[in-house]
Image (cartoon, rainbow, N blue to C red):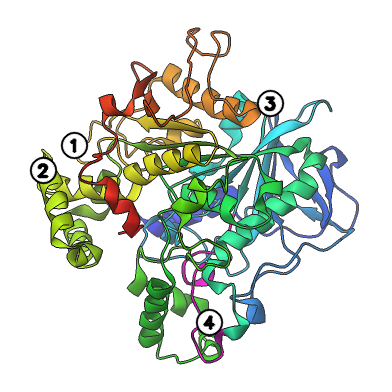
Amino acid sequence: MDIDINKIREALHAMYGGENKPITDGQYDHALAVKCVNGTFVGRKNENVITYRGIPYVGQQPVGDLRWKAPVDATPDDGVYEAYYNAKSAYGNKDFEVGSMYYFDEACLYLNVFKTDDAPGAKKPVMVWIHGGAFESGGTIDPMFDCNNLIKEHPEVIVVTIGYRLGVMGFLHLSHLADGKDYPDSQNLGLLDQVQALKWVHHNIAAFGGDPDNVTIFGESAGAGSCTLLPLIKGSHQYFRRLIAESGSVNLTRSPQEAIECTDRLMEVLGCKTVADLLKVHADKLLEASAVNFLHQFPERDGKHLPTDTFEAYASGAAKDIEILVGCNKDEMNFFVYSFGPEGWDAFADGRKQGKFAQMPADEKALVESYMKDVQGAPFQPFASLLSQSWFNVPIIRLSEEQTRGGGKAYTYYFTPESPDPVMKCGHAIELAVVFNHPEMTADTGRPFDETFSKTVRQMWVQFAKTGNPSLTAHLAPDGKPKQWPPYDLKDKRVMVLDEADIHPAREADVKVVDWERTYFLTKYYAL
């Protein structure tokens, strides 16, 4: 694909960019102003949707001496500020093409609020979006996550999109370094940023008309992984009661040893020995050097913020009071083949094969090889399907199992519509245009999805956020036919098949989301 990154960056900046400034002359539309703890923020209205962009949710941005420090609480402020422009995006990884489309800044802890202009009434359910990007790319400025269309269709909810630290800035183990003891949270700062954003929402969303006691977090890929990890962080449950995880789970983590190895590789590339050395390195150079850890910069099962066994934590009831809706796409990894291209995919696949796969005992290797041997299709497909299983499909099903076993409730889906592209098929992130009501953003799918199907999926997401149950009555269903979505159970293992022609519940054994004999064990390796 021939893409002019600079033109896209400029176009995005023209649409959403700029710099929010203090309003000191009192000249602003008071009807669009909302008083929050840390200031009064003035949004912009487009038709019936009011958008507030670039609201800081911390008292100080993580720059200078605060790099690799925990987020700072928002502080009281009586000032009035523009909320017209999206903040710059967190430093991530330039190896991700999408990440190169954004302007980067270490001052990145901001959020956006989307709501309709309604007369005051009952507090609305709130949906907080956490973007994906492998924990090292992406941002709220992505046009896909502009929520105007979603809010127009569903004015009964308020949507918030949040930024958080990524990659080397958000997930860097430092405590093993000589001067690292002063950075005890650096390995999971991105998650702590998300908790801080949720805390801000809890304390301020009522001023926008939202219900702080009815918040649903939702995300895709790393955002979905974040959503499933957040319930495991102490004190987080007071800020949300439900989560929706699209194609991501608690397996998207690394061990302390793996995190230390990533840090040591980075230090070697930079020629640094201490945190003090790292603090002197410009963010651009850190970003460039972090490519050495491409697709390895995950949250850490550090035993402090996250348990050392995230699946077991769910099985023990750590999230039993949180209602969850989770699922995966039929051909997850095909998106990466499509995005990387043949040579890029081969290099990536070779690297993964030389990692944990190479270290498996003989009996496990035999199972994996047997699975790949039965996969039909292009030469790339066997390993792509295996990674789909190990990264996405199996962990989602296991999470549903453990949440149910722990006394909680899980609604599980299997998304199946395909792109006509023979490589993409039903790849990772293909559902985003459906969820955010952007039928025009289907370049990767090659076609828009069926309108009634798309409306039904969105209605289910919103219904879950409102009530904790995604089932639809005939009155709520866009096609006038009820959609009963059963919770996952340990006997029949029922999932909701999100098929364009026929949304229906089915036993997992009938749709074969996972290969129980040959791939289920891979969850013990977390992210391969």
Q: Does label 4 or label 2 sit earlier along the sequence?
A: 4
- Does the residue at mark 4 contact the one at mark 3 (Cβ under 8 Å)? no
Image quarter for residue 185? bottom right
Which residue appears at 55% of the width and 37% of the height? 408
Q: Residues within 10 Å of mark 2 (few under 14, many from 20)?
A: few
Q: Looking at the picture, how far across and down is residue 16, in whole percent?
A: 59, 50
Answer with left or right where residue 184 lies relative to residue 355.
right
| Residue wearing tag 4 | 175
Q: Which residue is painted at 26% across and 50% down in the image?
A: 387
Identify residue type, mark 3: Glu
- In the rendered structure, find residue 156 and report the number of the disc placed on it: 3
Q: Which residue is mark 1?
A: 422
Give x and y (percent) for residue 252.
Answer: 41, 56
| Tag in front: 4 or 3 | 4
Could you give the CA–CA distance between mark 1 and mark 3, rounded to whole angstroms? 39 Å
Q: Point out the frontmost of discs 4 and 2.
A: 4
Q: Mark 2: which secondary structure?
A: loop
Disc 3 is placed on an element classified as loop
Magenta segment's dominant SS is loop
Q: CA distance from mark 2 to mark 1?
A: 9 Å
Residue 190 in the image: above or below residue 315: below
Q: Earlier in the sequence, mark 3 or mark 2?
A: 3
Looking at the rendered structure, the kind of residue marked 1 is Pro
Q: Amino acid at mark 4?
A: Ser
Quickly name the residue at label 2.
Answer: 378
In this view, the residue in front, 308 or 383, is 308
